[in-house]
Amino acid sequence: MITPESFLNSVIERNGRLGQDACRILAAAIQAVDPYQCVIEKLHLDGNELIIDNDRCSVEQINRIFVIGFGKAAVPMAKAVLDRLQDKVDFARVIVKAPEFVNEVGYKNKLEVLIGGHPVPDENSIQATRSLIADLPQFTPRDLVIVLISGGGSALFTSPLGDISLDDLQLMTSLLLRSGADIQEINTLRKHVDGVKGGRLAALLSPARIHTLILSDVIGDRLDMIASGPTVADPTTFADAWEIIRKYDLTDEMPQTILLLIRDGMEKRLPETLKGSDLEGFHLHNHLVGTNRTASEAAYEEAKRLGYNSMVRSNTLTGLTLDVAKALDADLREMKTVDKPYCLIYGGETTVKVVGGGLGGRNQDLALHMVPKIRDQKELLFISFATDGEDGPTDAAGAASDAIVFSVGTKMSLDVTTYIDTNNAYNYFNKMGALIKTGSTGTNVNDLILILAGANN
């Protein structure tokens, strides 16, 4: 359970009321996108009617109900469905990252839990996916399949096409992550090398009624990009995938099996991902149940309740951490004429161009870029936080910074520029007691950035 205390560290604590309020605001944001609550609020039984979001159907029209899911939040989402529908569910199986979710196996005597790998898929991802698909029956129009999707779904739910091996898939993913490609670019590639993405899962489930409940971890909430759009028509093409490889100059490093498959697709020797016309006649509905906007609005309301001049500046913050830090610095300069205390809220997901051998994640890297920029900003607290509690390959969810961080670092002979240049934000902030370590939050709606100022005056 995420509480305000989950976010505390030395930097936050020394900021007095600013720090206490920041923790309350972050906790409110995470609680607003609790996956169990997000699903259970969208699913109801009203007499003989099953209501999913705004869609209604008679229970008498449904012979069997199947629940499948994949993503970091798949277990609590599945538990919400099972709590609502009880013994009406015939089958419930999900793929998750965290091994501790295995403890939920057998929930309501229905739930099965499989483990996969993330952010880079592993053999468990492939085996879990193939096991889930293999155990599904032949569907009829009187069957209902509830698909539960959350962050991490692309890596956890995967079945590579053709001769593409796990090593090839892992290398492709790692190359794209290191290059600074954004999630939409990464998922464009994933959709075209995978047998369950880009609308292909919908084809496997047809002619059943398909209702997909989605906790979005993609900026702009593009349904075709969340978990690489397994139940959504795909507007991207093999040519788009090839252009991304060229954009990041990866043709020499990308596995030959992937290059050959994409070329075959471009030359029409392989079928494209499913387009809108391919899904015509499908009984297919996709529902967003929680987004970054949901979390940002909850943060806004909590900051307002605490007495701040509260502003959501963006829910689509993207770009390299270096560039985003410059934009945030410009925003702060504009705020000099705004009444304090204020709280600026940003949602989105930055990217990092990895050039050094250090340790960190995008939120830590962004916070590190901000250290020299806020060195003279007294009564100001900066926080960048991954809503899933996992920032890069570290045990931190993000980091906090204030003016004191720079001065303390200087006294400790820590050159912040060197840490920036080597992508070593984790070790810099670890020395400062500035890392935020919540552990897994159980949800994932991208990142949140808070800038609080003036409440201690």
Image (cartoon, rainbow, N blue to C red):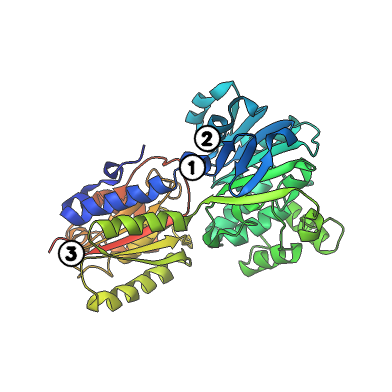
The 10 Å Cα crowd at callout 2, few under 14, some 14 to 19, many 20 or more, is: many
Q: Amino acid at mark 2?
A: Ala
Q: Residue furthest front?
A: 47
**Mark pair 2, 3: CA separation:** 42 Å
Q: Are marks 2 and 3 in contact (CB under 8 Å)?
A: no
Residue that carries the numbered disc 3 in the rendered image: 379
Rendering quarter of residue 191: bottom right
Residue 136 on image: x %, y %: 74, 32
Residue 276 on image: x %, y %: 76, 60
Q: Amino acid at mark 3?
A: Glu
Q: Amino acid at mark 1?
A: Pro
Nearest to the observer: residue 203 or residue 432: 203
Asked if 397 appears above or below 380 in the picture, the reply is: above
Nearest to the observer: residue 451 or residue 47: 47
> From where the camera sits, is residue 106 visible?
no
> From where the camera sits, is residue 314 visible?
yes
Rendering quarter of residue 456: bottom left
**Mark pair 2, 1: CA separation:** 8 Å
Residue that carries the numbered disc 2 in the rendered image: 80
Residue that carries the numbered disc 1 in the rendered image: 35
Q: Residue furthest left?
A: 457
* Residue under the image location 31 percent in, 41 percent down: 3
Which secondary structure lies at badge 2?
helix
